Image (cartoon, rainbow, N blue to C red):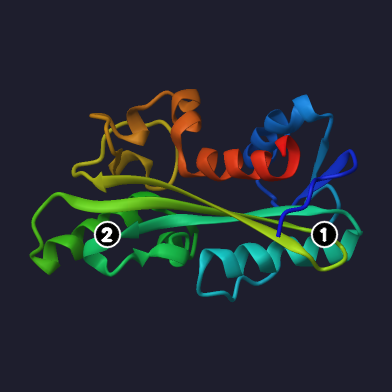
Amino acid sequence: MTRRFEGDKLLVATHNQGKLDEIAHLLEPYGVTCVGAAEMGLPEPDETGTTFVENARIKAHAAAKATGLPALADDSGIEIDALDKAPGVYTADWAETPHGRDFIMAMGKSHDRLVETGIPEPWTARFCCTLVLAWPDGQDMVFPGVMEGSLVWPMRGSQGHGYDPIFQPQGYDVTFGEMDRWEKNKISHRADAFRKFVAGCFDA
């Protein structure tokens, strides 16, 4: 299903200000104002899905239903082939501690499990991002994005977040953690999904 975005206000179903700013910047040329879930006083729904698209749908539809606005949500994570595509949708869960998320610990855990498998490098992996745009009438559109690459060890670079310091995108000799933020934003899994979203809803 394709459906043009009509209107000038989009609810971005995230409590992450950085993500909200990124999407708002992307949609500025189209005259769309973006508001975040926190600004609208929306709770974060439980992400009970087992795929990226299921979790993004849960967030997008909950926000659209609660506000009567079209809502955009994303779910993202990293799939490591030698670990049967884990952690995948559970990427953030692997970083959970009683004191908040610790991605250095999560990266260490991933490396330890890779070593335990005995599978030699290169350890192929990909970052995945699925965007879902939901309308209050229950319709939605799905835009998947990927960035292929491999995992390296030890960690390199202090830019970015999450697994960026151990992910080397295909065709590059630096990790996301060593890459300029704006350079990464042009080639990332989220950029891939955004391009499809804009092409499908605004440029069509």
Q: Nearer the viewer, residue 160 or 1?
A: 1
Tell me where residue 70 appears, x and y as whole percent. 83, 53
Q: Quadrant of residue 113?
A: bottom left
> Real-space Cα distance between discs 2 and 1?
37 Å
At label 1, the amino acid type is Trp
Residue corresponding to mark 2: 110
Placement of 74 over or under 9, stated as above or below: below
- Counting every numbered tag in the picture gives 2
Q: Which mark is residue 204?
A: none
| Residue at 8% from the left image edge and 56% from the top image edge | 120
| Residue at 72% from the left image edge and 39% from the top image edge | 204
Q: Nearer the viewer, residue 104 or 117?
A: 117
Q: Nearer the viewer, mark 2 or mark 1?
A: 1
Placement of 129 over or under 187, stated as above or below: below
Q: Quadrant of residue 138?
A: bottom right
Tell me where residue 77 appears, x and y as whole percent. 45, 56
Tags 2 and 1 in contact by the CB under 8 Å rule?
no
Is 192 left or right of 134, judged from the image as shown?
Answer: left
Residue corresponding to mark 1: 135
| Residue at 70% from the left image edge and 28% from the top image edge | 25
SS at badge 2: helix
| Residue at 51% from the left image edge and 70% from the top image edge | 51
